[in-house]
């Protein structure tokens, strides 16, 4: 382990614990950064046995020094907080519950969705502003502005640093799961440019894993982790040798990550035993079927989509279900369902129509649907995929 | 303890019956009562509609007066609560009850207690 990997692994945990000790995220970040600056000099030879504890203790001591020099009201408040913890042992390590508090603070619904994502990646993932900006293809200034504003709102509006009570928990957990799911999706099918941004996928999996460990009794948290693992497992097969998109039925299954699949299947079984299904668990179960055996059992997939549609009656779920309907009952019935759906601007609707029309032999209609999908697609790899499909229909042009 | 303003936003262009108004008053009065028994309540007040509003503006060492509110929009401030509680979550859960009681959006805004920059 070198300093960089310690930073990536410990930054979020240390900031979370220091936030509890100091009562302010900004002060906590400064203190942790101070401590890492000291570490750069002191860890020249060898890492301490417990780097996280070393950082937290050093950061706490640095914060005390700094607060003694300052005399603002905020500094006095933070100092008072520190002094009211007399039982704190001399060396303190990062506390796991602090991370959970931080997740709920960063994903508070009073923050804008973009601020939630940026704060989660920065404060929990330890990603640098530049890394987040690169991942989302936005200027660094935009990301840092979002983070600064988010932290200001947390402080000034009094967004609490705690795990919500039982009454609020379902709503608030849903907001946390959404953020992690969106981070993963942005990495898996980026809204623009190239197809995959692996670092975002890995970060989302890491955070989902931490959440599932912190909340082992929340079936939807387990469901989300299973869903991400089973999707992530197929990533190596999703892009072909020349960077092209490979759809599920055509993927080389030997490229799938067996370890992640086994872990995902085990989690899905755990959810089934608990029998409190929710949208993420159902999506995980669908992906478990996709990754079970040599080919997908579409009858089972369709049954799960029926259940998912009852939980989440959205047009996107109905569109995904239509794909399963086509496999079980044929493309004509699926097309009838798809034609009823309204998803303005979403390229996957005309793309699915195009595929169904192709299978029904309605080539001219299929070409028109591909054209529509190509216009709407924002991801280069997906657009190329659609163009290839369309070209197959009109070999002479 | 922090203090929060819970401001009721009211669309003045939508007429409502006297009966609706009475029912709302009864519901909001109940929320106020609960705030009082929880020790959260600081102040509550309903406002006259914007036709009764006047703005006084300073300029060149004197003032000018204009009829009407700051902004001539449909949505106007109709009334507000001031509450004190530990954090935003507590304020938001009161705002939930206020919004349901008066059937209107509530803006939740912390008072500046001088702890910021």
Image: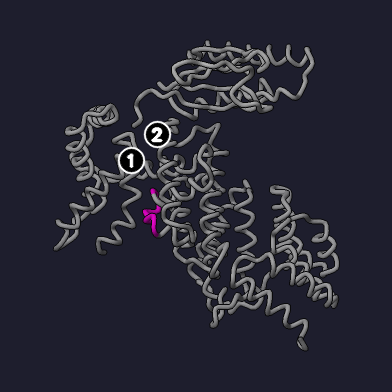
| Horizontal and vertical percent position of residue A269 | 57, 57
| Horizontal and vertical percent position of residue A332 | 85, 68
Q: Quadrant of the C terminus of chain A?
A: bottom right
Which residue corresponds to the image point at 85% horizontal and 78% vertical from the top-left?
A361
**Mark sitting on residue A26:** 1
Q: CA distance from mark 1 to mark 2?
A: 9 Å
**Mark sitting on residue A6:** none
Check disc 1: other Cα within 10 Å, few if <14, some if 14-19, many if 20+. Answer: some
* Residue A207 falls left or right of residue A391: left
Q: Quadrant of the N terminus of chain A?
A: bottom left
Quick check: can you spot residue A85? no
* Magenta-drawn stretch contains A232: no
Residue at the far front in the pictured view: B60
Residue tagged by mark 2?
A155
Both labels 1 and 2 in a single chain? yes
Which residue corresponds to the image point at 77% horizontal and 83% vertical from the top-left?
A394
Element marked by disc 1:
helix
Chain-order first, disc 1 or disc 2? 1
Q: Nearer the viewer, residue A113 or A298?
A: A113
Find the magenta span and give its range: A123-130
* Residue A40 falls left or right of residue A330: left
| Horizontal and vertical percent position of residue B25 | 68, 12
| Horizontal and vertical percent position of residue A331 | 82, 69
Q: In the image, is residue A28 above or below residue B80?
A: below
Quick check: can you spot residue B54? yes
- Letter of the chain that mark 2 sits on in the rendering: A
Among the 4 quarters of the image, the one containing residue A100: top left
**Do callouts 1 and 2 mark residues in contact (Cβ within 8 Å)?**
yes
């Amino acid at each position: 382990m070198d300093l960089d990997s310690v930073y990536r692994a410990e930054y979020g945990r240390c900031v979370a614990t220091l936030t509890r000790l100091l009562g302010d995220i900004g002060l906590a970040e400064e203190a942790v950064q101070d401590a890492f600056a000291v570490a750069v000099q002191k860890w020249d030879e060898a890492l301490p046995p417990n780097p996280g504890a070393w950082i937290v203790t050093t950061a706490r001591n640095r914060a005390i020094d700094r607060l003694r020099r300052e005399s603002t009201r905020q500094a006095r408040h933070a100092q008072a907080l520190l002094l009211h913890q007399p039982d704190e042992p001399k060396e303190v390590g990062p506390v796991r519950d602090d991370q959970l508090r931080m997740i709920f603070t960063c994903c508070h619904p009073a923050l804008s969705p973009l601020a939630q994502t940026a704060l989660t990646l920065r404060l929990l993932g330890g990603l640098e502003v530049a890394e987040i900006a690169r991942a989302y293809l936005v200027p660094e200034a935009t990301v840092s502005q979002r983070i600064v504003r988010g932290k200001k709102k947390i402080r000034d509006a009094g967004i609490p640093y705690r795990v919500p009570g039982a009454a609020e928990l379902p709503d608030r957990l849903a907001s946390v799961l959404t953020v992690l799911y969106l981070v993963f999706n942005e990495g898996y099918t980026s809204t623009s440019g190239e197809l995959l941004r692996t670092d975002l996928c890995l970060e989302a999996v890491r955070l989902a894993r931490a959440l599932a460990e912190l909340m082992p009794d929340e079936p939807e948290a387990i469901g989300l982790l299973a869903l991400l693992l089973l999707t992530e497992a197929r990533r190596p097969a999703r892009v072909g040798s020349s960077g092209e998109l490979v759809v599920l039925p055509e993927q080389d299954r030997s490229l799938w990550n067996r370890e992640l699949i086994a872990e995902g299947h085990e989690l899905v079984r755990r959810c089934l035993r608990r029998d409190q299904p929710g949208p993420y668990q159902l999506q995980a179960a669908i992906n478990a079927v996709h990754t079970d055996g040599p080919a997908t059992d579409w009858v089972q997939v369709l049954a799960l989509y029926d259940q998912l549609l009852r939980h989440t009656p959205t047009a996107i779920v109905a569109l995904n279900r239509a794909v399963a309907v086509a496999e079980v009952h044929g493309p004509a019935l699926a097309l009838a369902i798809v034609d009823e759906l309204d998803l303005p601007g979403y390229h996957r609707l005309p793309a699915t129509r195009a595929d169904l029309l192709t299978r029904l032999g309605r080539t001219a209609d299929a070409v028109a649907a591909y054209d529509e999908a190509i216009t709407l697609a924002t991801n280069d790899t997906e657009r190329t995929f659609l163009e290839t499909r369309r070209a197959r229909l009109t070999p002479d042009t | 303890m922090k203090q929060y303003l819970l401001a009721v936003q009211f669309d003045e262009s939508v007429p409502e019956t006297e009966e609706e108004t009475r029912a709302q008053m009864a519901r909001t009065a109940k929320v106020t009562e609960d705030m009082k028994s929880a020790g959260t309540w600081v102040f509550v007040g309903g406002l006259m509609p914007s036709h009764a509003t006047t703005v006084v503006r300073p300029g060149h060492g004197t003032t000018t007066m204009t009829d009407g509110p700051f902004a001539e929009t449909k949505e106007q401030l109709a009334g507000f609560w001031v509450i004190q509680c530990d954090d935003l979550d507590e304020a938001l859960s009161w705002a939930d009850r206020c919004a349901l009681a008066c059937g209107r959006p509530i803006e939740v805004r912390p008072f500046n207690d001088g702890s910021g920059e």
